[in-house]
Image (cartoon, rainbow, N blue to C red):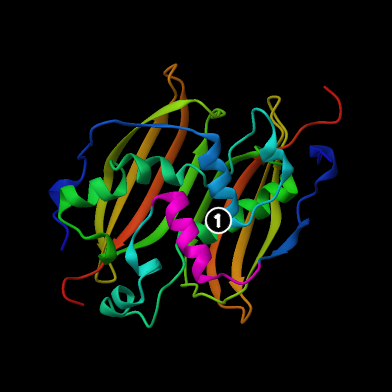
Amino acid sequence: MARYFEDVNVGDELPELVKDPVSETQLVRYSGASGDFNPIHTVPRVAQEVGLDGIIAHGMLIMAFGGQFLTAWAGAGAVRRYKVRFSGMTKPSETVVCRGQITEKIDEGGQSLVRGRLTIKGADESLKLKGDFTVELPRKSG
Amino acid sequence: MLEPSHKGKTFPPFTYTIERSKLREFLLAVGEDDPAYDAGDPPLPPTFPTLFAFWSGSGLEGVLAQVGVEIYNVLHSEQEYEYLAPIHIGDTVEGQAAITNIYQKAGMDFMEIVTDYKNQAGVPVLKDRALIIVRGEGG
C-alpha cells in the first residue's frame, strides 16, 4: 500500500519498529554480508584487547535497522537522504526500538519530499543513534 | 594524532558490481522481509551501499591503511547517504574516496571521508559521507 504525500502531516509519528534481540550469529552474518570484518564485532578476545567487555554490534547494522524502519513507512526505494550520529554501543541480546517523527514537508517545484528525525534506543532507553532523513512520496494525482 | 596533511588526499577509484545474492544475504542479516526486495528490479535498502567499499577492499580499510590507522582503533561517529539516482542489480558502481576534513575536538581526532559513486553510464548515484574518530595509541 503506497503512502501518499498528501496524507502526511508535520508532527506525524512513524510506527515504532521493535527489532528482535541482536544475536552473535546475526553479527557474523552481517560481517559476511557487509564485508566489515572488524573483529571487535565477532571475536570476544579482540574486543577485550581493545578495552570492550565483549563484542559489540556494527553501528552500520543498527543504521540498517533504521533504514528498515524508514522504508517500512515510506516504501522501499523512497529514501533520498539518511544521516545518523552514533551514540551508544549495542551488545548481543539487546533489543532496539526505532522511532521517528515528520518535521517538514517540501511541496515546491514539483517536489514531494518529507523530512523527519529518528532515534534508535535500547530497551532501557539508552540512545544508540539519532538521525534525520528525507523521503520522496508519490502524489495522489499528477 | 592524525597527520593534518592527509586532508585533501584522494584515493584510487574502485568498482563494485551489485548482485542479487548479495542483496539477499544483506536482507537476511538485517532481518528485513519487505517483499518489495523480491521484485525483478528491486530498489536497494538504504544502507546496502555500505558493502560497496568494504567488498572492494578499497574503501575505509584502504583509506585507513594509507593514513596508518588500524581499523579496530576507529569509531564511527556519523554516517550519511545521499541517494542521487537509483542503483540496480547488475550495475557496476565506481567509487572515489577523499579525506575531506581532519580536526581535533575534545581531545579526539576526527576524520571525514566522502566517497562519490557513479554508475557505469557515468551518472552520479550516491554520496557517502563518513565521520570517524581515531582513538589514541595504546589505549
Is residue A135 shown left or right of residue B20?
Answer: right
Q: Residue at x 79, y 38 (%)?
A: A5
User: Can you say whether B36 is above or below A83 in the image?
Assistant: above
- The part of the chain drawn in magenta is A20-35
Local secondary structure at mark 1:
helix
- Per the image, is A29 magenta? yes
Residue B53, position as x, y percentages in the image: 36, 42
Q: Name the residue under label 1.
A: B29
Q: In which quarter of the image is the N terminus of chain B?
A: bottom left
The spot of residue B116 in percent (x, y) is 38, 34
Residue A105, placed above or below residue B108: above
Residue A9 to residue B11: above or below = below
- Residue A39 versus residue A73: which sits nearer the camera? A39
Answer with the quarter of the image where residue A7 lies. Answer: top right
Q: Check if residue B52 falls in the magenta segment.
A: no
Residue at (51% x, 44% y) in the render: B48
When asked about the image quadrant of residue B106, the answer is bottom left
Say left or right for B82 vs B35: left
Chain holding disc 1: B
Q: Main secondary structure of the magenta part?
A: helix
